[in-house]
Amino acid sequence: MSKPCFTPATFRFLRALDRNNSREWFHANRNDYERHVREPFLQLIGDLQTPLQKISPHYLADTRKTGGSLFRIFRDTRFSNNKLPYKPWQGARFPHERHREIQAPVFYMHVQPGNCFAGGGMWHPEPDALKNIRGFLVDNPVAWKRATRSKPFREHLQLGGESLLRPPRGYDSSHALIDDLKRKDFVASASFSEDLACSEQLMTWIVATFKQVAPLVDYLCAAQDLEF
């Protein structure tokens, strides 16, 4: 077990940000953000470097303050109807080493009052990547079932994301994996409580969850012709 990274103050700050989502409030309380949210998350990312490398040597836990695993707290409001400037949550993605040259699955964790979770996969894959995944599903159905329907996977993870209402063009509606072929997202996650987030057990739980979702990430890497 490792020293807790997050504390109840982490969640107090995020709740307060949700209530006071303005630049003025954030600047007045920025020290609390750094102390209770950003620095603990960067510490956790650093702690995950070694265990993540054991899961896959091709995945990165990048502790840089900008451009690394930690998402920015600032929202991009340019193309959104929601003009609130900040996200009332903090997330981190752990990308494939080749993520800048090809769309790749990630490991992910998310800290938000009432909505903490960790998992992995591909969220909204681009058309070429989506085509690759669906083609790979048709060609490798047994490996998909092995990756997503094992007892450890089903007991701890839940497949999520959006799906088409009808089969994608060119696919038979009677195909054995039609529900998976209709997916627009290929992600799985498990939720955790605020109490766990603030405990010494969080690190162990995150590593175990990443191990459980690794077969899905591995499968999606293969669909994109990436090493895992």
Image (cartoon, rainbow, N blue to C red):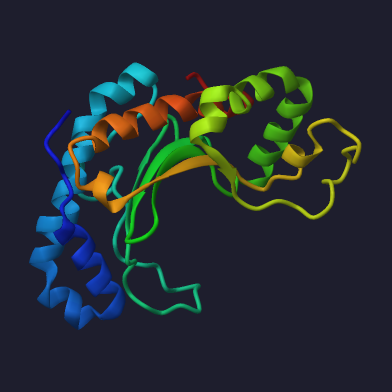
Camera-nearest residue between 4 and 151:
151
Looking at the picture, how far across and down is residue 66, in whole percent? 24, 50
Camera-nearest residue between 213 and 63:
213
Looking at the picture, how far across and down is residue 44, in whole percent? 21, 39
Pick the quarter of the image with the N terminus: top left
**In which quadrant of the rendered view does residue 158 lie?**
top right
**In which quadrant of the rendered view does residue 203 lie?**
top left
> Looking at the image, can residue 97 be seen?
no
The answer to whether residue 103 is left or right of residue 64 is right
The answer to whether residue 171 is left or right of residue 30 is right
Camera-nearest residue between 87 and 127:
87
Q: For the point 31% across and 70% down, which residue is it?
A: 86
Give above or below for 173 relative to 194. Answer: above
Q: For the point 23% across and 61% down, which residue is it?
A: 11
Q: How many marks?
A: 0
The answer to whether residue 211 is left or right of residue 10 is right
Q: For the point 32% across and 67% down, which residue is it?
A: 88
> Looking at the image, can residue 152 be seen?
yes
